[in-house]
Each structure stands twice: as structure tokens, then as C-alpha cells.
Amino acid sequence: MRAQLLRRDEHGFALIGVLLMLFLLAGLVASLTVSGQTETKISLNYEAEAKARAAAEAGINHATSLVIDKLATWQADGYASPSAAINALLKGPDGLTGTAARDADNGSLENLGADATQRIPRPGTRRQLTPDEQYEARVFDDDDPARGVTLSAADVSRISEDNQIFNDQNKQIVIRAIGYGPNNAVVTLETTVGFGVGDAAIIVNGDIDIQGNVQIQGAAGSVHANGDLDITGSPNIQGDATATGSYSTSGHPSVGGQTGGGFAAIAPPNVQASDHRAEADWVLTSAGTMTNSAGTLICNSASGGCAARGWTYSGGTWSVTGNGIQNGTYYVQGDVSITGNPGPATVSIISEGSIDIAGSPRFQASDPGLFLLANGDIEITGNLTQTGAEAQILVREQISVGGNPTLLGQIVVQNVPSVANLVHANRVDTFYGSLSLTYSGGLGGGSGAPAVTGWRQQ
């Protein structure tokens, strides 16, 4: 009897064990099921967000390409300035604002691009990529509150804007693309396209002082210092006046574009006379002789033979003191001094030393795109008149320009530590008097073309 009871207890315990195991297995199965469903949902969400991001990236790339292409032709399209071209994009194809009907196309890119089937429809309308991927895109002024970004008065001042959403001030425009994926996934991206100050009339890798009645004119009539910029008197700068360091003014200067300090530096080229040796028609040697580009002796200054060509030589300096000079590009193994009134002549000068120009010479550049280059300093006073095509003045050390010169093109100063002593050694480059410098852009000191200057995801 007792044995029978024991066997019944064993069967009961076994049954309870089996039931417990079944409960554990059921719980494990339920857990795996829930986990699988969760992982599936997470995977679907990731996929939806990835599709929305891909759509947004397609939209921002498409819109940015259209905007850059459009703004790059602002001059050919007849706009007075880059900002005028940006204003046209902000107002949309109808060029009007102020009513619901007029504002419907504000910021629209619907007319941009050669192929109508590839254009971006107006704001609020999506462009289909796949059955579950779409995007829309439009442009804003960067101080437009419709972007959903709150800017303080200090912020607006910092970005050189004016709180007028159809009146660009800083030559920048914001492009927004919204990408849509399945399950209501949305990703918003923005880029900023701007013109910057790279293609400026004056670019100095250091400090600049501008004084007096200096006139900087032309479509690229801007000034940029990779140090401090100080403007005094009544200069007139048609474009921007910017600095990486501090910016200060006194008197009554007029600046047509953006101003201030804290701007990005512009890397100057490495100025080396020897890099341009092959461009020379004539070589003025440190031995006091003139040769042609092949090294054939043309004249010897010791016997006065180079005077007929306008040059004399003494103590390491080649000088022009009269009114005549032979046309051509000169490579000079020493310093250059021009004190007479030579010209009109077609002349470019590349010097391993410094260049000092006074008097009233009248030159146009003989080397396309290059007027003057010095490994040392350049000082210009008097009434130098540059004619013809625009060309660069490249300086390795320092520059000082005053008097009443008329120049056409771009001045780029590398501003390395001073070795020459023609210009003061404190590495502040000075422009004063009644200098007139006109520059329309494109000589290579930087890029004045529109480009992406910022990116963010909302």
C-alpha cells in the first residue's frame, strides 16, 4: 500500500514538472514572438527613415545643383549683383510678393533646369522618386523665420542680414529639402550656398590699413585681410570689407557689401619669382646684363648698352629713370626702381627682389594675368596708370600703395616675415591716398563663384 502511494506521488511530481516546463516554453515562445515583432518594427522604422533620408539627400543635391548653376550666371543674366540674383530666387518665378497668390511660388525652383521633366515642383508639392519615396525643396533667405529658426538681433547682425526676407544682404541663400519615406518618416536637410569673398580685389595674409580716398571698384571690388582690417578717412569699397581678425572704421568710409571680422581665412598662393621664370622675354641679371629668354646676351649695362632699352644697373638695382622702356615681360635678378615717366608700354615685371614704382609710368601687362610680382616688397607712389586687361600684382612680403595710381586687377599679398626693407617691417599692408583699383573677378586669387558654405539636418 505504501509503495503504491509512493508511486502515485512520483507520478504527481513528474506531472507538475512537465507542466512547469510547458509554462517555461510557452513564456519563451511568447518572448521570442514579441521580440521578433519589436525587431521587425525597428527594422521597418530604420528602413523608413533611411528611405526618407535618401529622398532628402536626393532633393538637397538636386536643388543645390540647380541653385549654384543659376547663381553662377548672375552677370550674364543681367543682374546688378549676386544679391539681386538671390532676391529673384526668393521671390519665385513671378517676381512678386505680398498676397497669397503671389507668395505661392516664393522660393520655388520649378523653372530651373533645362529638362522640364527633371525640375523640382513648387513648394508644397512633392517630386516622386519611388512609390514610397518623395521630396520637396525650396529656398529661403537665411533670416527668414519661416525656416523655423529663431534669430536674435545679434544673430542677424552677425550674419550681416536685415530681417527682410526678400532682400539678401550677405550673398547667401538657404536651400531646404524635405524627404518623405513610408510610415510617415520625414527627414529635413539644409545647405547654405554663398559667394564668399575669395575673389576680392585685395587679399592680404595679414593686417590691412586703408586710408584717405581709396576707391575699390568692380564686380569683385572687395577687400579681405587674414588679420585685422582698419579703414579710416573716406574710402569707397564697392564690395565686401572683411577680416579674419578685427574690423574697425573711422571717418566716413563707404562699403557696399558685407563687413566685419571673424570671417574665414583665404589661403594665399605661394609667391615665388622663379615659378614664372619661363614667362620672361628679357632677363635682367645680377651681373648687370640683359639677355633674352634663351640666355643670349642683349646688352651690358656697364658699357651703357642697356640705356637704349630704358634700363640702367647699379648696386643690385635695375632702374628706369627716363621715358622709354622696351616692351616685354622682364625677369629681374635683383630690385627694380622706376622713377621716370615711361610708356605707354606693354610691360610685366617679375622680380627676385623688391619693386619701387614712382613717377608717372603708363603700362599694360604683357604677361596675361600678371602685371607685377616681387619676392620682396612692392611700393607704388606717384601716378602709375595701368591700362588694358586686368592682371594680378603678387607680393611675397609687404606692399604699400599710395599717391594717385590707377590699377586694374587683383592684389594678393602672401605677407611672409620681412627680409626686404622697402616697406615698413611691421607686416601691415597699407593702401592710401587716391588709389583707384578696379577688379571684375576671375584672376585666380580665390573663387567668387557660388559654392556650398554650410550643411545641417533639422
Image: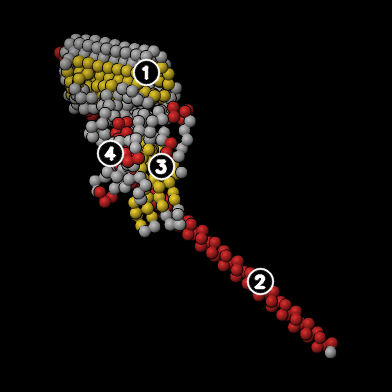
Q: Nearer the viewer, residue 99 or 207?
A: 99
Q: Which of label 4 and label 1 is nearer to you?
A: 4
* Residue located 84% across and 87% down the image: 2
First in sequence: mark 1 vs mark 2: 2
**Which residue in the protein does label 2 denote?**
24
Q: Which of label 1 and label 2 is nearer to you?
A: 2
Amino acid carrying mark 2 in the image: Leu
* Mark 3 neighbour density, 10 Å: few (under 14) some (14–19) many (20 or more): many
Amino acid carrying mark 4 in the image: Asp
Q: Nearer the viewer, residue 146 or 417?
A: 146
Image coordinates of residue 369 in percent, x first then y, are 24, 27
Image coordinates of residue 358 in percent, x first then y, are 26, 11
Placement of 124 over or under 258, stated as above or below = below
* Residue located 35% across and 50% down the image: 126
Splitting the image into 4 quarters, where does residue 182 fall? bottom left
| Cα distance between the residues tagged 4 and 3 | 24 Å
Contact, CB < 8 Å: mark 2 with mark 3? no
**Which residue in the protein does label 4 denote?**
94
Amino acid carrying mark 1 in the image: Asp
Placement of 46 over or under 151, stated as above or below = below
* Residue located 20% across and 25% down the image: 389
* Mark 4 neighbour density, 10 Å: few (under 14) some (14–19) many (20 or more): some
Amino acid carrying mark 3 in the image: Glu
**Which residue in the protein does label 3 denote?**
190
Splitting the image into 4 quarters, where does residue 83 fall? top left
**Which residue in the protein does label 1 denote?**
429
Contact, CB < 8 Å: mark 4 with mark 3? no
